[in-house]
């Protein structure tokens, strides 16, 4: 699969068969410039404007925005209900983590998760090859809690998201806060680009953090 980071928490995942999945598209109120993206499937972790804007999405796409199992041929997408805050949703409501299963791999996009998830959720996510994880705090988990989730899930690849960049206007922490803590535990690779081609054969033995650049 090819994973393109489009900024913030938005990714486009292109499968070997050409299927395009867009994850958490944002609007134009957070500093990033929304890109027009053609997709077959769009996942929405929650209804906030920086994760659910469809006006820039083109194509005959299906929106997945509910918990449960959704099947598209060889691809299975499972939504797991979590919370957007540390108060059982009292401040910001619910959040959905999505697990994409295809070609013997699992990719988990944790949306705007705001607290350590339940044991049931961890059990389903545990061992995912790829974990897309917010690390910027304030609206989501912070660097410390992100590291706790990494230790619980034990993914092969960790891709940070939802952190402060020169393009972002949100009041969230920079990636350096997470890397300072997690870099003592995991290898860190800086791609210098906004996309990653990965499959079972290219996975490494040790867990690593892969940093994408917003270009």
Image (cartoon, helix red, strand yellow):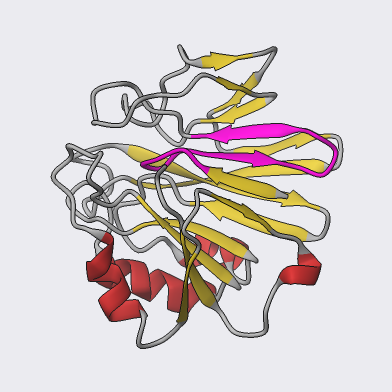
- Residue ranking furthest to the left: 171
Residue 82: x and y, percent? 41, 49
Residue drawn 35% across the image and 63% down it: 116
Q: Tell which of 127 and 24 is nearer to you.
A: 24
Residue 132: x and y, percent? 49, 55
Q: Quadrant of residue 143?
A: bottom left
Q: Is residue 64 above or below residue 183?
A: above
Residue drawn 29% across the image and 52% down it: 114
Q: Is residue 118 left or right of residue 173?
A: right
Q: Is residue 30 above or below residue 187?
A: above
Quadrant assignment for the C terminus:
top left
Q: Tell which of 93 and 53 is nearer to you.
A: 53
Residue 193: x and y, percent? 50, 52
Q: Is residue 109 left or right of residue 27?
A: right
Q: Tell which of 74 and 1 is nearer to you.
A: 1
Looking at the rendering, the stretch of residues picked out in magenta corresponds to: 5-23
Q: Is residue 182 left or right of residue 172?
A: right
Check residue 185 for magenta coloring: no
Q: How many numbered tags mark residues here?
A: 0
Q: Quadrant of residue 37?
A: top right
Q: Is residue 173 above or below residue 111?
A: below
Residue drawn 45% across the image and 29% down it: 25
Check residue 17 for magenta coloring: yes
Q: Is residue 166 above or below residue 107?
A: above
Residue 15: x and y, percent? 76, 42
Residue drawn 22% across the image and 69% down it: 177
């Amino acid at each position: 699969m090819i994973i393109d980071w489009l900024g913030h928490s938005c990714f486009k995942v292109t499968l070997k068969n050409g299927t395009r999945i867009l994850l958490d598209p944002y609007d134009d109120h957070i500093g990033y410039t929304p890109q027009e993206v053609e997709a077959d499937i769009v996942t929405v972790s929650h209804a906030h404007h920086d994760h659910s804007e469809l006006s820039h999405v083109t194509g005959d796409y299906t929106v997945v925005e509910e918990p449960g199992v959704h099947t598209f041929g060889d691809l299975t997408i499972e939504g797991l209900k979590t919370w957007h805050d540390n108060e059982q949703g009292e401040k910001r409501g619910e959040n959905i983590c999505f697990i994409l299963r295809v070609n013997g791999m699992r990719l988990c996009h944790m949306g705007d998760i705001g607290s350590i998830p339940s044991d049931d959720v961890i059990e389903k996510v545990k061992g995912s090859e790829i974990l897309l994880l917010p690390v910027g705090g304030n609206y989501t988990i912070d660097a410390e809690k992100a590291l706790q989730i990494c230790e619980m899930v034990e993914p092969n690849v960790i891709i940070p998201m939802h952190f402060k960049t020169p393009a972002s206007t949100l009041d969230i922490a920079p990636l350096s806060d997470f890397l300072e803590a997690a870099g003592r535990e995991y290898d860190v690779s800086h791609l210098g680009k906004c996309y990653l081609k990965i499959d079972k054969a290219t996975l490494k033995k040790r867990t690593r953090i892969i940093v994408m650049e917003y270009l």
